[in-house]
Image (cartoon, coloured by chain):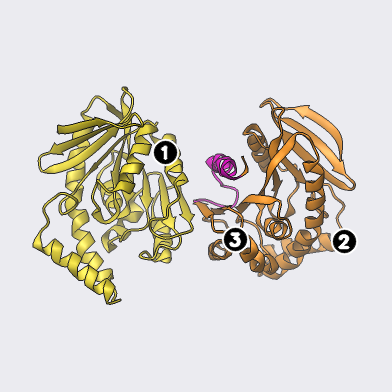
Chain colours: A yellow, B orange
Amino acid sequence: MHFTSEQRLDDGVREREFTLGEIPGTLWTAGSGPAPLILMAHNNGLPRREPRLVARARHSAASGYAVATIDGPGCGERPRSAADDQARAELRRAMRAGEPVDEIFESFVGPLVDNAVPEWRTTLDALLALPEIGGAVGYSGWTALGIRLMVAEPRIAAAGLFAGGYVPRAQREQAREVTVPLLFLLQWDDEGNPRQRALDLFDAFGSKEKTLHANLGGHTGTPWFEAQDGSRFFGRHLK
Amino acid sequence: MHFTSEQRLDDGVREREFTLGEIPGTLWTAGSGPAPLILMAHNNGLPRREPRLVARARHSAASGYAVATIDGPGCGERPRSAADDQARAELRRAMRAGEPVDEIFESFVGPLVDNAVPEWRTTLDALLALPEIGGAVGYSGWTALGIRLMVAEPRIAAAGLFAGGYVPRAQREQAREVTVPLLFLLQWDDEGNPRQRALDLFDAFGSKEKTLHANLGGHTGTPWFEAQDGSRFFGRHLK
């Protein structure tokens, strides 16, 4: 893991860019002692520099966590294959035409998840070797990746998941294998995410402790107090 | 309003019993300055001395609220009519026999709500005249009473509602008239409360800001952190 840049932000958070082989990532920390780690990923592999993710990461870092994110294969700054570009173009076309998009999402998001998992695990190995990181590990964000990662990765002790992305069938079936405490966030009027499918997914998780927070409004309307609730959820399970 | 007894509890909370005409009630406060008021009622008119309600009330008082509850007509220490006793007996019989209980609940809970509302409003008048109470008013607990009270009572600025009780049809229809911020608590496996009906009720409320918290487990299994989340919800709206 090579740190390529560092800045101290006005909320006292230290933001460092890193590379790990081909993987570009960002690590946010505050304070000096070892802090529990939160792996944070955006739904459907959106870029790690997306302002909403950065705001959540800085809030969590200021609350006493080390927060890390990467751009997985085909995401953010990473090169895209011709197949990726074609899938994205086909998705835009179908949405404009008002056609069903489930199968396109399936064939686009499925491989994104599959290809991202080994890189997140490699990143987790490297992060846990840093002296500023210690204690339990949490996961926050992209539901499909979170399910796949938690099934493969016993080091993740708790997760806050956003219901708003496409969850491939394979991950919907794996949900019962997830057993760690969950906080599952749903936007009640999310235009791109059928509500009943999200409720069914919440029902399917195998966790004994799981909480659903649903708020009024569309996909990007999650109220800010949910970031605070998320920090308290992780506080109960990682600290 | 006559205070009939007072004790100082080990968490620093002052617990006072009162009567207001025929109405018996309890007021919990902490500190000396005027505090925002939370009216707290148990689902289906359970007694105000029920330990789970008392624990929530003391937690909220220790968090800086004045909390008050009463036994409405036919509830707790109040005399019961022969009709009340008959309805309760019929309800027990039907539940033992595995018969549908909706209509019995309807004819039992409907009048409980109707009769309780004027007494809660009278109590609110008296409480707001006390020097230790000031600021906004919240409501917590019994959903059916909360809906009916909020529709009649513009002084209630926010409410935390428990989905686990029977909500008469009249209140389900009034839900769209409720417009204040809501926190709606649902126990996902509540044996006596159909989940879909609770989700439909959440959907029906007219409030622009409403949040659903659903937790795994049965009727009495609400996790303790929901009491803390409730205090923070009221902190955003009453303080």
Q: Position of residue A12 (x, y in %)?
A: 34, 28
Say which label, 3 or 2, has the lower sequence index.
Answer: 2
Q: In the drawing, does residue B189 fall left or right of residue A103? A: right
Disc 2 is attached to a residue of which chain? B
Q: Residue B193's mark?
A: 3
Q: Secondary structure at mark 2?
A: helix
Question: Magenta stretch containing residue B174, yes or no?
Answer: no
Mark 3 and 2 residues: CB-CB less than 8 Å, in contact?
Answer: no
Disc 3 is attached to a residue of which chain? B
Q: Residue A144 or A60: which is nearer the viewer?
A: A60
Residue at position x 35%, y 54% from top? A176
Q: Position of residue A6 (x, y in %)?
A: 21, 31
Q: In the drawing, does residue B123 fall left or right of residue B179? A: right
Quadrant of the frame with the N terminus of chain A: top left
Q: CA distance from mark 1 to mark 3?
A: 31 Å
Residue at position x 29%, y 58% from top? A171
The reply to whether label 1 and label 3 mark residues of one chain is no
Image: A236 above or below B161: above
Residue type marked 1? Ser
Q: Residue A231's mark?
A: 1
Question: Magenta stretch containing residue B236, yes or no?
Answer: yes
Residue type marked 3? Asn
Q: Residue B15 or A44: which is nearer the viewer?
A: A44
The reply to whether label 1 and label 2 mark residues of one chain is no
Give the extent of the magenta segment.
Answer: B215-237
Q: Position of residue A91 (x, y in %)?
A: 23, 68
Quadrant of the frame with the C terminus of chain A: top left
Residue at position x 74%, y 37% from top? B133
Q: Secondary structure at mark 1?
A: helix
Q: CA distance from mark 3 to mark 2?
A: 27 Å
Counting the numbered discs, the total is 3
